[in-house]
Image: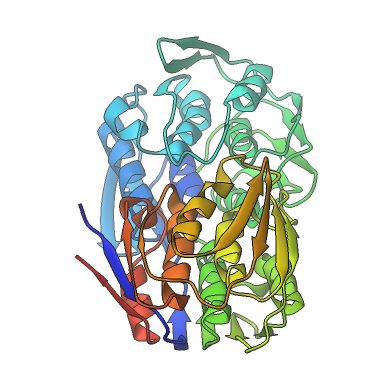
Amino acid sequence: MQKIYIAGGQPLKGTVRISGAKNAALAIISAALLASEPVILDNIPNITDVRILLDIVTKLGAKVAYQDETTVEISTPDCIDTNTPYQEVKKLRASNLLLGSLLARFHRAEIALPGGCNIGSRPMDLHIKGLQALGASINLEHGFIKGTCKRLTGSKVYLDFPSVGATENIMVAAALAEGQTILENVAKEPEIVDLANFLNSMGAKIRGAGTDVIKIEGVSQLGGGRYSVIPDRIEAGTFMVAAAATRGDLLIDHVIPTHIEPLIAKLREANVNVSEEDDAVRVIGTDELKPIDIKTLPYPGFPTDMQSQMMAMLTSVKGTSVIVENVFENRLQVADEFKRMGARIKVESRTAIIQGVNKLQGAQVKASDLRAGAALIIAGLIAEGETEICNTHYIDRGYENIEEKLVSVGARIRRA
């Protein structure tokens, strides 16, 4: 088993370039199966989750060819296997996004209930409800979601919660449905907008992505084309917090600042200097960081995917900070690992109360999910002594070359 070792105490200084967005890439790769012509995708992150999904679509019968490390061509014939391989699906939550594309184009899908990080309850009921509204017949049998349909038909769908995955699945399915589909109370994340833009670039007719209501006029088929995935706002945010926590000075390049405004606002509240450029942000950590309160919410609220990293920073900020996790109930379990490093954190239900300490101490810790792993790296960067992080496979699911990027800006980090 690989481990990451960090010798803390070094401020991060320099420039780091952000990779393509994991969550956008996974949705776009799944949607690429709708295309009747080849699709070329640029700025695809070279991470475990993407490689697993590309392996799944290859086993279904699509042809996948890497043009370079971040450019992939996907060609999907008119007839493919619609039974997804269990061994791969169980590793990847985003495999459920294949449900909409397989039903829309091939009228059949069989997908094992997906795996992924254990960060809390993420039921499929909203996905199923929406696809059933479009005319799909869906059953849960022996751990599999089995769906069939003739051509899907447009409908009006209201989501009880603005689920990102459900919004994506239903939007993809509706792109090839007959007639108009109206989705209400949908997710508004930048990844939703990127997926809609990708579908539109192939001939779909989608309006309203990024708002509460998305309207889709179904088309009979989609062509191919070339599309570049947006930068990863969570990777950008992770490096921003790492710069602030280590009291460093980082230029985070290849970002869209409007996508990370909630984080920028909180960092400034914590007395971090953040300046925005057209496609970059500069973060300078100060010696007098201030405690803050955070409540996670669906976009454009503070992202749950940045909560663990902010907790890592706040462990060494003098005073009392409070984090309320409103999205995934298991996100706060990383607090136990911080406490192994000397942090003072009290968790009550979905609330963490952090009393800042002068210094964290290096220790052996383990990542319980992707963002917890990133947070433990930040904790290791500010700790005194060496930190050993186990379960590094979680980190590799969402961060491309994270050790190399950190070493390039002064971190003492290695993998063994």
Q: Quadrant of the C terminus?
A: bottom left
Examine the rendering and report whether any part of residue 226 can be seen.
no
Q: Is residue 138 left or right of residue 405?
A: right
Using the image as rendered, state which of residue 337 and residue 102 is in the foreground: 337
The image position of residue 218, as x and y in percent, is 65, 33
- Colouring mode (rainbow / by chain / secondary structure / one colour): rainbow
Using the image as rendered, state which of residue 20 and residue 215 is in the foreground: 20
Residue located at (75% from left, 41% from top): 214
Q: Quadrant of residue 4?
A: bottom left
Q: Is residue 379 left or right of residue 58?
A: right
The image position of residue 88, as x and y in percent, is 30, 34
Residue located at (31% from left, 52% from top): 393
Using the image as rendered, state which of residue 263 and residue 363 is in the foreground: 363
Q: Is residue 57 above or below residue 74?
A: above
Examine the rendering and report whether any part of residue 177 can be seen.
yes
Q: Is residue 208 above or below residue 276?
A: above
The image position of residue 130, as x and y in percent, is 66, 24
Q: Quadrant of residue 320?
A: bottom right
Q: Is residue 329 above or below residue 279?
A: above
Residue located at (66% from left, 68% from top): 260
Q: Is residue 311 left or right of residue 118?
A: right
The image position of residue 235, as x and y in percent, is 50, 66
